[in-house]
Image: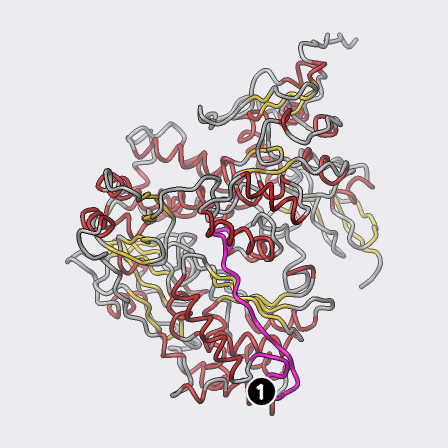
């Protein structure tokens, strides 16, 4: 196997070390592929599927986990790519609480930013939460949990277990009822959490936020 | 395997994985608690609190639903109210479709109406045990007697070469019988050529596609063929370890396999020097903690590695990076079981078993509105109409209305396509697929929309939840379809379903999400009456 591979992304060629993901190769070219689950600090997991691109294969491919192959021709912004990303956003927005705790405090809600960028202002789907599903967990003095805002991107889990090695967080349950949990599914404040803050720092939504910032409202600046 | 085996043992011993027992295990094995919670909450065999001493697991999927109605599990639960110590649970297809409606009383397969099940569980009458279906499993056994078994392996080890085995499999045209239909010879070639360790042969015996029960009968009746082909696979790819990943509801199959493994060990077919050749190979049986998704090959590998059974992003494929990071040769039960026959027949002999240019034979699990549901071994290329005749013809005087040739993931086709031959490509051209060979037959007068929605509900319930499209999209589809079924289809529903189907097919990580809407999409394409019930504008 050769040590480097060349691919063409949106008509531009780039040569990268073998094993490089399409997402990283695109970044070399200054092409931003949207993500919700991926972060360059973390092992890619390819679960949110926002980074899908067209490689000419039968299915779209998640750029964060798809290694480049020699001669690959990739489109990151074709109609097919855009309309499927839009559907994914519509599905996620159906369950998303309004207002978002993150948007209301630090103003950096990544899901809302992407929904705006893709023009997804409403969803044809209804919220799927059942009344018995747990929603808020305010047991931690530092971090507020809102399960309804969680999109299961696994950033908090990777941050907790793989970056900080605190080993507190997991996915719990299966299918549509999957959610994040602490230890043997106890409230965050009763778990072995050491309040390092990594999870709320990497969370792209209002699911995990810093309680100290609750009630803080950003003042929107007028851009001249 | 070590951790999941331990959790299964704890579950069996205490009837639950309680917080107390998991805290103790975490201390003993020095494991983080979250890891145990992730597993306990993912696998259906585990629960956090013990249930009633006895459990009746009632099937809710298509073959049983068609016979007994959508409320069957509820009716059984109602009938058993007041019978102490019994818990009724609705479960996904149990592979007992020939005996619909079916259930498991503990480990015992039972069949019958709510009253019969109630009386059996209450001890008022004997349990209505399932009768064995017609099953033509011996059709592929090349050995007349037990002492001749493993002769194909013996000959290959003494006179053949791994390369010759691969060439025969390639030329035979054998394809994976688990559902995907990948060419078997090519898979063996890729795995043999892949570098790295550990090298493993895995038999995927996690059969759970609704309507599929051929593997169960092959495991129970010809386990020696599966063992023989796995040893041969180990020799070809250079592996000394084999693992059979078995569905946990298949207790009789587990006993048959264990006995066959023991006999193979006594014969020297397994062990340090297989039949005196100097090649070492042994195999073990791993009982799954449950869930349809575990039949997806990379979810299965995650399970073997003691993780939540969530499918991996591919590539890499298991032939390159499989169990524990090494090359893994994974085939379905039927695929393995056919191999001794193919090698005995030779390429021409095998091809001659098929009809008019189609190669070999195929096992079909036939269920639904046929007089004699069962497992039939048919020549490749036989038209579906003839398969239905083979299974006793249509039951109850019904005319054929629709059929799904290969399990929940293969679209329904109307009666006028029943002339299509049993073949991967021919059925794909007809708009469906051979899938796992689960031919589900629907007669006139049945509610096909209800059955198709049940298939979508099956996928949604069995979704692992890893990726967004499958986790959220399949559940949203079920909600909208249920509303339509109640006579309230929303405006634009069929367009929304088309769009959602595209996103599921295009962006889901694995086959489950990719096909989750296929059963309903096939109604929009081929069944105008059912499609009209999904269109508000025409209602």
Please give the chain letter of the residue carrying mark 1. Answer: B
Residue at 51% across, 82% down: B266
With respect to residue B294, does B449 lie above or below? above
x, y (%) of residue B237?
A: 65, 74
**Quadrant of the rendered image containing residue B88:** top left
The one of B26 and B387 positioned closer to us in this rendering: B26
Front-lying residue, B268 or A41: B268
Left or right? Give the position of A83 relative to B536.
right
| Secondary element type, mark 1 | helix
Is B107 left or right of B15, judged from the image as shown?
A: left
Q: Is residue B298 above or below residue B424?
A: above
Measuring 65% from the left and 69% from the top, which residue is drawn there?
Answer: B191
- In the depicted view, which residue is nearer to us: B6 or B537? B6
Q: Quadrant of the C terminus of chain B?
A: top left
Q: Which residue bears the numbered disc 1?
A: B275
Q: Position of residue B213 (x, y in %)?
A: 37, 62
Residue lying farthest left? B397
* Residue B33 locus on image (x, y percent): 63, 40
- B293 inside magenta stretch: yes
How many numbered marks have been drawn onto this rendered protein structure? 1
Magenta-colored span: B270-294
Q: Residues within 10 Å of mark 1 (few under 14, many from 20)?
A: some
**Which image quadrant for residue B194?**
bottom right
Q: Is residue B116 above or below residue B144?
A: above
Which quadrant holds the N terminus of chain B? bottom right
Q: Is residue B151 magenta?
A: no
Using residue B517 as the reference point, say whether residue A93 is left or right of it.
right
According to the image, what is the colour scheme of the structure? secondary structure
State the image coordinates of residue B278 (x, y, percent, origin top left).
66, 85
């Amino acid at each position: 196997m050769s040590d480097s591979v060349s691919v063409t992304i949106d008509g531009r060629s780039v040569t990268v070390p073998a094993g490089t993901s399409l997402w990283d190769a695109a970044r070399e070219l200054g092409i931003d592929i949207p993500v919700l689950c991926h972060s360059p600090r973390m092992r890619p997991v390819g679960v949110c599927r926002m980074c899908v691109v067209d490689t000419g294969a039968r299915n779209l491919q998640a750029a964060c986990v798809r290694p480049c192959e020699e001669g690959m021709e990739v489109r990151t912004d074709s109609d097919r790519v855009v309309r499927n990303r839009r559907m994914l956003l519509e599905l996620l927005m159906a369950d998303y609480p309004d207002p978002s705790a993150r948007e209301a405090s630090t103003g950096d809600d990544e899901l809302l930013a992407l929904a705006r960028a893709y023009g997804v202002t409403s969803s044809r789907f209804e919220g799927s939460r059942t009344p018995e599903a747990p929603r808020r967990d305010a047991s931690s003095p530092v971090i507020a949990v809102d399960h309804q805002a969680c999109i299961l991107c696994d950033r908090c889990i990777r941050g907790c277990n793989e970056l900080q090695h605190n080993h507190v967080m997991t996915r719990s349950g299966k299918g549509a009822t999957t959610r994040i949990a602490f230890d043997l599914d106890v409230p965050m404040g009763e778990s072995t959490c050491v309040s390092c803050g990594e999870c709320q720092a990497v969370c792209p939504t209002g699911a995990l936020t810093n309680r100290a910032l609750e009630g803080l409202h950003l003042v929107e600046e007028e851009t001249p | 395997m070590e951790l999941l085996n331990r959790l299964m043992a704890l579950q069996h011993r205490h009837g639950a994985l309680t917080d107390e027992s998991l805290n103790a295990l975490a201390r003993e094995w020095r494991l983080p608690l979250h890891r145990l919670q992730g597993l306990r909450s993912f696998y259906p065999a585990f629960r956090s609190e013990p249930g009633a001493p006895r459990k009746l697991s009632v099937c809710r999927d298509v073959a049983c639903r068609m016979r007994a109605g959508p409320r069957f599990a509820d009716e059984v639960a109602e009938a058993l109210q007041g019978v102490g110590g019994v818990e009724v649970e609705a479960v996904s297809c149990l592979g007992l479709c020939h005996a619909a409606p079916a259930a498991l009383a503990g480990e015992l397969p039972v069949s019958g109406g709510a009253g019969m099940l109630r009386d059996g569980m209450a001890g008022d009458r004997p349990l209505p045990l399932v009768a064995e279906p017609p099953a033509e499993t011996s059709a592929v056994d090349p050995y007349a007697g037990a002492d001749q078994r493993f002769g194909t392996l013996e000959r290959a080890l003494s006179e053949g070469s791994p390369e010759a085995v691969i060439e025969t499999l390639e030329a035979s045209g054998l394809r994976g019988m688990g559902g995907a239909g990948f060419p078997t010879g090519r898979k063996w070639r890729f795995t043999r050529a892949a570098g790295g360790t550990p090298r493993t042969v895995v038999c995927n015996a996690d059969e759970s596609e609704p309507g599929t029960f051929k593997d169960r009968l092959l495991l129970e009746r010809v386990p020696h063929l599966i063992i023989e082909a796995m040893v041969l696979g180990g020799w070809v790819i250079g592996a000394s370890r084999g693992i059979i990943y078995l569905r946990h509801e298949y207790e009789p199959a587990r006993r048959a396999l264990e006995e066959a493994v023991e006999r193979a060990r006594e014969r020297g077919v397994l062990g340090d020097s297989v039949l005196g050749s100097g090649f070492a190979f042994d195999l073990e049986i791993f009982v799954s903690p449950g869930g349809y998704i575990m039949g997806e090959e990379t979810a299965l590998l995650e399970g073997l590695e003691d993780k939540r059974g969530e499918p991996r992003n591919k590539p890499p494929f298991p032939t390159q990076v499989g169990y524990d990071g090494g090359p893994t040769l994974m085939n379905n039960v039927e695929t393995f079981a056919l191999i001794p026959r193919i090698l005995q027949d030779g390429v021409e002999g095998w091809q001659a078993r098929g009809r008019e240019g189609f190669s070999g034979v195929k096992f079909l699990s036939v269920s639904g509105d046929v007089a004699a549901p069962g497992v039939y071994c048919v020549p490749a290329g036989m038209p579906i109409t003839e398969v239905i005749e083979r299974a006793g013809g249509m039951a109850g005087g019904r005319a054929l209305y629709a059929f799904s040739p290969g399990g929940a993931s293969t679209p329904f086709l109307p009666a006028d396509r029943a002339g299509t031959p049993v073949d991967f490509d021919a059925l794909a051209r007809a708009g469906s697929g051979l899938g796992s060979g689960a031919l589900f037959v629907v007669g006139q007068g049945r509610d096909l929309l209800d059955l198709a929605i049940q298939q979508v509900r099956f996928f949604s319930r069995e979704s692992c939840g890893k990726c967004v499209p499958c986790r959220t999209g399949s559940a949203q589809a079920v909600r909208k379809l249920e509303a339509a079924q109640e006579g309230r289809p929303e405006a634009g529903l069929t367009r929304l379903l088309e769009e959602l189907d595209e996103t599921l097919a295009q962006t889901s990580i694995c086959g489950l999400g990719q096909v989750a809407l296929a059963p309903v999409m096939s109604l929009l394409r081929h069944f105008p009456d059912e499609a009209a019930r999904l269109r508000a504008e025409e209602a």
